[in-house]
């Protein structure tokens, strides 16, 4: 009767926890935790890089590496520089009230405005990238914590099942001893 009770207690606990004493699910969950931790470390590194790039652009966007490497911005800077030299040449030859000078001055202002807009676009892109990185890090941290909690719960359930299994084993040995003595 004691052996049957111990076995029933073990099977009830296994059924409730969804685990068996020899269940390898804990190993799978630990592996998943390791994967999440690796992803978190990568996301933190990417976020640190994007935050540093955004911080650099926020301080001085004109000399930010992302701005300096942008082909559109470089093209606009070249055009602005050419227009400025043309404007200086026209100003010296025709004067600053000449229609060509005024037209060229307006074009130069439009190009400077386009350059400012493009630099702002790069800055916003860096800000968005930094924000996305922060959100991803936060999400992965939550996932890692949830996975740790799940592993702890599974470990506790596995420990309870191990205690019940030892109960079954010791009761089984006691039963076998009683049977042996009875047969003697």
Image: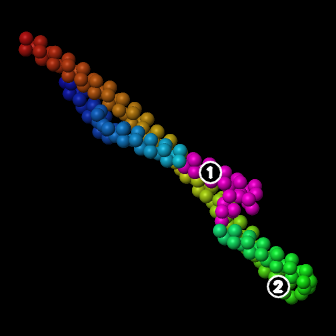
Distance from the alpha carbon under mark 2 to that under mark 1: 43 Å
Can residue 170 be seen at all in this image of the molecule? yes
Residue drawn at point x = 35 percent, y = 29 percent: 160
Q: Secondary structure at mark 2?
A: helix
Residue span colored magenta: 43-70
Q: Which numbered mark, 2 or 1, is in the foreground of this view?
A: 2
Residue 132 picture location, percent across and down: 59, 56
Residue 131 relative to residue 26: left or right? right
Residue 152 picture location, percent across and down: 43, 35
Q: Which residue is mark 2?
A: 103
Disc 2 crowd rating (10 Å Cα; few below 14, some 14-19, many 20+) is few
Residue drawn at point x = 82 percent, y = 85 percent: 103
Dividing the image into 4 quarters, which one contains the C terminus? top left
Q: Give whichever of 65, 173 is nearer the camera.
A: 65
| Majority secondary structure in the magenta region | helix
- Judged from this view, the residue extending furthest toward the left is 183
In magenta segment, residue 89: no
Residue drawn at point x = 46 percent, y = 39 percent: 148
Q: Give whichever of 110, 28 is nearer the camera.
A: 110
In magenta segment, residue 45: yes
Residue drawn at point x = 24 percent, y = 25 percent: 168
Residue 31 relative to residue 98: left or right? left
Lower sequence index among marks 2 and 1? 1
Q: Which residue is mark 1?
A: 49
Residue 101 picture location, percent across and down: 86, 84
Q: Secondary structure at mark 1?
A: helix
**The quarter of the displayed image where residue 86 is located:** bottom right
Mark number, residue 122 = none
Disc 1 crowd rating (10 Å Cα; few below 14, some 14-19, many 20+) is some
Q: Give whichever of 132, 161 is nearer the camera.
A: 132
């Amino acid at each position: 009767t004691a052996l049957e009770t111990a076995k029933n207690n073990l099977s009830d606990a296994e059924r409730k926890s969804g685990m068996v004493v020899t269940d390898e699910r804990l190993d799978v969950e630990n592996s998943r935790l390791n994967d999440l931790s690796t992803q978190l470390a990568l996301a933190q590194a990417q976020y640190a890089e994007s935050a540093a790039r955004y911080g650099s652009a926020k301080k001085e966007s004109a000399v930010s590496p992302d701005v300096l490497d942008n082909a559109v911005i470089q093209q606009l800077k070249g055009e602005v520089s050419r227009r400025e030299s043309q404007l200086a040449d026209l100003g010296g030859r025709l004067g600053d009230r000449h229609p060509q000078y005024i037209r060229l001055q307006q074009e130069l202002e439009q190009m400077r405005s386009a350059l400012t807009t493009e630099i702002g676009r790069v800055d916003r892109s860096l800000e968005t990238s930094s924000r996305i990185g922060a959100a991803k890090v936060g999400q992965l941290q939550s996932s890692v914590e949830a996975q740790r909690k799940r592993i702890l719960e599974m470990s506790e359930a596995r420990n309870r099942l191990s205690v019940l299994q030892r109960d079954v084993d010791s009761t089984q040995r006691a039963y076998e001893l009683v049977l042996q003595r009875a047969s003697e």
